[in-house]
Image (cartoon, rainbow, N blue to C red):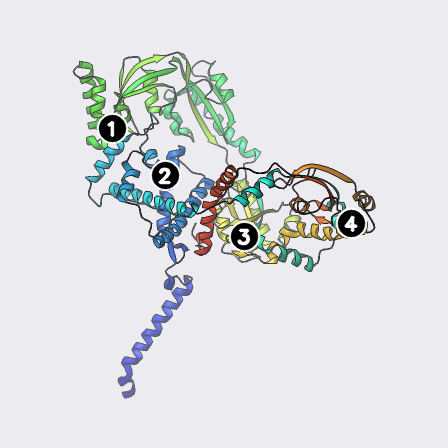
Amino acid sequence: MGYLRERMGKIVAIVIGLSLFAFIASEAIRSGGSFFRDDNNELGNVGGEKIAYDQFNKDVEQNSAQFKQQSGQNNLSPQIMNYVQENTWNQAVSRLIIKKEVEKLGLTVSPDETQAMTSGNNPSPQVVQAFTNPQTGKFDRANLLNAIQNIKQLKDDDPQKIRWADFVTQLIQAKQGEKYMALVTNGLYVNSLEAKDDYEAKNRLVNFKYASLDYASIPDSKVTLTDGDYSDYYNEHKGEFKNQQELRDIDYVTFNAAPSKDDSAAVKEQVSKLEPAFKASTNDSLFVQINSETKAPLLYQRKGKLAPKVDSIMFSAAPGTIYGPYLSNGGYSLVKLVDARISPDSVKARHILLDPNMEGGLPKALAKADSIKKIIQSGKKSFADMATMYSVDKGSAQKGGELGTFGRGAMIPAFDEPVFNGKKGEFKIVTTQYGVHLIEIEDQKGSSKVVKVAIVDKPLVASTKTQSAAYSKAQAFLISLTKDNFDDQATKAGLKKKAAENVNGTAASLPGLDNARDLVRWAYKADKGDLSDQVFTIGDQYVVAHLVQIKKKGILPLDAVKKQIEPAVRNQVKGKMLTEKFNAALNGSSTIDQVAQKAGSKVVPVQNIVFANPMIPGTAAEYKLVGTIFGSQVNKISKPVAGQQGVYVFTIDNFINPAPLTNAVREKQQIAQSILQRSEGQIFEALKDKDNVKDYRAKFL
């Protein structure tokens, strides 16, 4: 006991230390070492500098918002989102790579250059885009300068001021990147010898004859490929198998859970039952909101805007007419003609736009619009004067609020309806997503029939019975699998196996599967040969998958490309067999006609072939053949040349040299332009290799 009392402090310290170590070790094992490496937020790495997942997500959100604004789409498909994410990733990688190079070289952007990019006479295209009036399509400099002045007066922690500062920082970084690329590309040079070689490659002609033996002349069944054949081809072409990023090969089968005929009949019946109540309805807008899957507003529409069959019926029917149910856009619909009238083809209008946020709320903005209307109607102030004073739409305000002449559908519905349904000279106060508008209808031209229709739709979806039957088949198939019997079981079940090769870690879709992120994510966690640990639900398909191959970044091993190179290896072996046949024919022959006769071929004359375009009429591009021809002597029978389509023997009739190149300036300019177009991408790829870019997106996205 005395011994323990004397040493209790040390014993407790040791026990606590071991406990802490055990806790840390278990956390490290559980989280893949992230406790030590802090990699839970590391999406990628560029030369030792981390790309943070949270910042990447913010950038993706910003780029998605910009894409939505530019494209007019509210929802982005998985394919578009994948495109946005890929662009955002490339931006992040490029930013870090260029940043490192810029810092090493000391490249800067001066305050004067920054001012020129933001508010100078030639602002950045991004600034022009951000401050282009959507109604006129023209750059609004006054709005830009006004916005900058307002931002300067904001507090430093104001979100709007922070966003502007970030925007300017991005412009500066882009400018630094431009300077770096200019520094490198200005060093590109084309000399006179290169210009001469390029000129002759495009203009020197050759006339020759050839005899060929096609690879297809030997049946595949007559060729047995050995491991040595594969190794020989692989070693000769190893540089072609460099993987720029890790990839996966996936085999999978699908079980269709799309709506059946019974499902279609059930939905059609469901819509049919709504017809009596729809016909009797006195509030069609409310009926649509309650009963329709698509809550579309009821708008007047010109002829040709509805589905063709519906269009022809509605424009010749009486109000109250109902058509349907009919199958359209993946569902059944009922359409009712609510009203028909004669409406102007175009309207000329002007407006004053008020921002409710600046006026203290919507009620105050509406009251102010009404006050402005009364002042204009009293004659105390003109519409143009009031637009200049109060409208937040500065583009139209500078023109007295004028919006010009526009057709139905050119404006948003909340704006369109009152100006086309009103009368010339009327004032309208309407609220839209942009704010409160005081509108004056200046003129209306033309007249044509328009109809207002109410549409009730129900989507055609698979019933629980249909889905359960398909899922049960998929589950039974998955249970029957082992790592070695995927192909056999698929054949036994009468399923068509599908293959997705070279799938990258951020792929959003696979052939026939539009939203396959869960499946791809599984593939990047699985080992070669693994079967999917679940039945994946992708759209109206149930999917069972098999991970066939993992292709690591770098030079791929032979077993990873063996299937891919098999046709080329077979042709190489056939080439050796056909070469032996030609060599036998060459023995004792003095003309190409004799060679062709012995080999069972025929002589084909070819004229006016240039080195830069190695197309042989009637076959395909034969780079090796044409290259050999331009390095050979006239009137001499060649040795066999194994090309793309077969093995060739040729003899050259003559070369036709072009006129001497007297002025190489234009030729140099063309070559330099071609090099310049490729240079930025090649520079970027070279820097990526140098900085050893690591991509961990597969485990996050």
- Residue at 22% from the left image edge and 39% from the top image edge: 151
- The residue singled out by tag 3 in the image is 248
Viewer-side residue, 44 vs 658 = 658
Q: Is residue 117 above or below residue 371?
A: below
Q: Is residue 589 above or below residue 5?
A: above
Q: Secondary structure at mark 4?
A: helix
Query: On the rendered image, what quadrant is the N terminus found in?
Result: bottom left
Residue 324 showing in the rendered view: yes
Structural crowding at the residue carrying mark 2, measured as other residues with C-alpha within 10 Å and reported as few (<14), some (14–19) or many (≥20): some
Q: Earlier in the sequence, mark 4 or mark 1?
A: 1
Q: Earlier in the sequence, mark 3 or mark 2?
A: 2
Asked if the residue under mark 4 is in contact with the one under mark 2, i.e. CB atoms within 8 Å, the reply is no
- The residue singled out by tag 2 in the image is 65
Mark 3 to mark 1 CA distance (whole Å): 54 Å
- For residue 296, the mark is none
Image x and y of residue 46, in percent: 41, 55
Residue 393 showing in the rendered view: no
List the single residue furthest toward the left.
380
Q: Secondary structure at mark 2?
A: helix
Q: Secondary structure at mark 3?
A: strand
* Residue type, label 3: Arg
Q: Earlier in the sequence, mark 3 or mark 4?
A: 3
User: Mark 3 or mark 1: which is in front?
Assistant: 1
- For residue 392, the mark is 1
Mark 4 to mark 1 CA distance (whole Å): 83 Å
Asked if the residue under mark 2 is in contact with the one under mark 3, i.e. CB atoms within 8 Å, the reply is no
Tell me where residue 376 sits by quadrant. Answer: top left
Q: Is residue 75 above or below residue 349?
A: below
Image x and y of residue 289, in percent: 38, 28
